[in-house]
Image (tube, grey):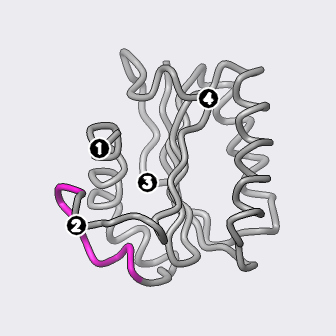
């Protein structure tokens, strides 16, 4: 089992309906490829965990890198895992524009602004910690 965590910056504005369209396609693809995970969106930033067989996850990540709806795609972690953190979610999702971030243990203000690729890299461990906290919130 394999996990890849990345962050990226949107190149277009994502309305709620655009996010739902993206999520619908992601869930259909992931269910068919035995990929699970979580997608978070905040202030034009995407944060995502992908879990599954390494070849399937890496193939999906290559497609994500080529998607022109975002840029500054930065891998925060690539690792072998013994079990999935999100085994039942073809793709969990949360639009953090409508979430009380104070509920989140380890809240960090990086969720309140658009980040650069450099910041994604510098804050990688904080971002990973925050993403993993969403499992306990739901």
The numbered mark, 4 or 2, whose residue comes first in the sequence reads 4
On the rendered structure, is 110 left or right of 6? left
Assign a secondary structure to mark 2: helix
Residue at the image point whose x is 61% and y is 72% from the top: 72
Residue identified by numbered label 3: 76
On the rendered structure, is 136 left or right of 23? left
Looking at the image, is 84 positioned above or below residue 94? above
Residue 76 appears in which quarter of the rendering?
Answer: bottom left
For residue 108: magenta? Answer: yes
The numbered mark, 4 or 1, whose residue comes first in the sequence reads 4
Cα gap from disc 3 to disc 4, whole angstroms: 20 Å
Residue at the image point whose x is 45% and y is 78% from the top: 118
Q: Do callouts 4 and 2 mark residues in contact (Cβ within 8 Å)?
A: no
Assign a secondary structure to mark 1: helix
Q: Position of residue 9 (x, y in %)?
A: 60, 73
Assign a secondary structure to mark 3: strand
Cα gap from disc 1 to disc 2, whole angstroms: 11 Å
Residue identified by numbered label 2: 102
59 and 114: which one is in front? 114
Q: Tell us which disc is closer to us: 3 or 2.
A: 2
Residue identified by numbered label 4: 90
On the rendered structure, is 5 left or right of 73? left
Crowd band around label 3 with a 10 angstrom C-alpha radius: few (<14), some (14–19), many (20+): many
Residue identified by numbered label 1: 137
Residue at the extreme left of the image, as rendered = 105
Cα gap from disc 4 to disc 1, whole angstroms: 18 Å
């Amino acid at each position: 089992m394999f996990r890849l965590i990345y962050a990226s910056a949107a190149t277009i504005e994502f309305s709620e309906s655009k996010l739902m369209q993206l999520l619908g396609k992601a869930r259909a693809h992931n269910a068919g490829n035995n990929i699970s995970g979580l997608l978070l969106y905040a202030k034009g930033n995407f944060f995502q965990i992908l879990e599954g067989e390494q070849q399937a996850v890496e193939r999906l990540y290559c497609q994500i890198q080529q998607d022109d709806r975002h840029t500054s795609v930065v891998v925060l972690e690539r690792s072998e895992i013994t079990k999935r953190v999100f085994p039942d979610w073809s793709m969990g999702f949360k639009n953090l524009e409508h979430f009380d971030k104070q509920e989140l243990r380890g809240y960090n203000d990086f969720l309140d602004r658009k980040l650069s690729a450099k910041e994604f890299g510098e804050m990688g461990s904080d971002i990973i910690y925050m993403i993993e906290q969403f499992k306990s919130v739901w």
